[in-house]
Amino acid sequence: MLPSLTLQPIGFLRTRQRVKFQAGHQPEAAEEETNVLELLPECGYEQALQDLAGMDRVWLLWWFHRNDSWRPLVLPPRGPSRRRGLFATRSPHRPNPLGLTAVRLLGVEGGRLLLGPCDLVDGTPVFDLKPYVAAYDAFNDSRAGWIDAVDAELRAPAQFAVVMSAHAETQARWLKESWSVDFSARLTELLARDPSPHRTRRIRRRGSTQSEISCGAWRAVFAVDGTTVTVIALEPAYPMKFLTRPGYDDVPDREAQLAFLARWPAGG
């Protein structure tokens, strides 16, 4: 048994998704989105891309480069707050954090592959890509155990109605128009299904009457009354002292957060 193996990336993904919250747990084929896989130059990879024309999808084999630990039991983001065996999930917290994603191939430009929606964040190392062949790769009648049960629940109508307060609506509109930051759809999707505290969905109590959900570089404060979830305010996920600390220029949406705190000093 080999004590270790060495892998070298063939390229890196470039996308606007800089934090995990922005990347859906599974890519949605219907969404309009273009990502770029930039292959390393001077490695002969451009010739290896020959004959990809006419293929609708490719498999990406990649690395969860932001994870450095694994857990035998994990809490999936979908479904009830119940831990599952790691190997029965697609959790990133794995002994060898390899990811596998089938993604639409939109085109090839030299050493760049134009890809559709995917669940990878910017800078993800990609080790290999292979053609998706429906005759061999799709088994539509296969059972998926607990995932089938959760999917059936998700197909049911949402249990909660999500509304934005006038204050939160003003903040969301300002973020979208001034900084092209818009996480309202994803926020609504998560809260409409289940706004209860959940570690993986990053929802926690905030005092006795409110809760908060982390949305990548942002947070939303909300309250639940029966089946109505009211988003009270939005706020940066990072405090001012962190955003202004030397050497932290690469914080996601840093400039937008600083401008937000200048406009709403209390953070919400």
Image (cartoon, rainbow, N blue to C red):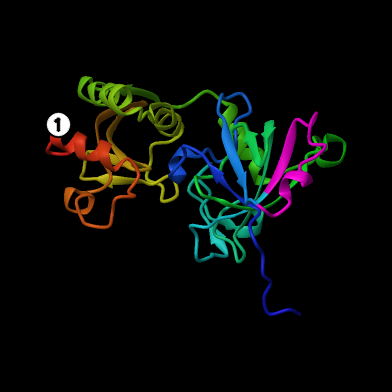
**Closer to us: 217 or 52:** 52
**Magenta-colored stretch includes residue 33:** no
**Which quadrant would the C terminus be assigned to in this image?**
top left
Residue 63: x and y in percent read 59, 56
Residue 58: x and y in percent read 73, 39
**Closer to us: 34 or 84:** 34
Which residue ends up furthest to the right in the rendered image? Answer: 135
Q: Is residue 264 visible?
A: no
**Vertical side of 54 occupied by 97: above or below:** below
Residue 140: x and y in percent read 79, 35
Q: Quadrant of residue 147?
A: top right
**Vertical side of 84 occupied by 202: above or below:** above
Task: Tell me if mark 1 has few (under 14), some (14-19) or many (20+) residues whose alpha carbon lies within 10 angstroms of its own.
Answer: few
Residue kind at label 1, given as amino acid type: Arg
Instruction: Give the labeled residue for mark 1.
Output: 263
As helix, strand or loop, the secondary structure at mark 1 comes to: helix
**Which quadrant would the N terminus be assigned to in this image?**
bottom right
Q: What span is in magenta?
A: 42-60
Q: Is residue 201 visible?
A: yes
Image point 60% across, 66% down: which residue? 95
Residue 231: x and y in percent read 28, 29
**Closer to us: 95 or 149:** 95
Q: Quadrant of residue 163?
A: top left
Image point 76% across, 42% down: which residue? 49
Image point 57% across, 30% down: which residue? 34
**Magenta-colored stretch includes residue 43:** yes
* 21 left or right of 6 in image: left
**Number of on-image labels:** 1
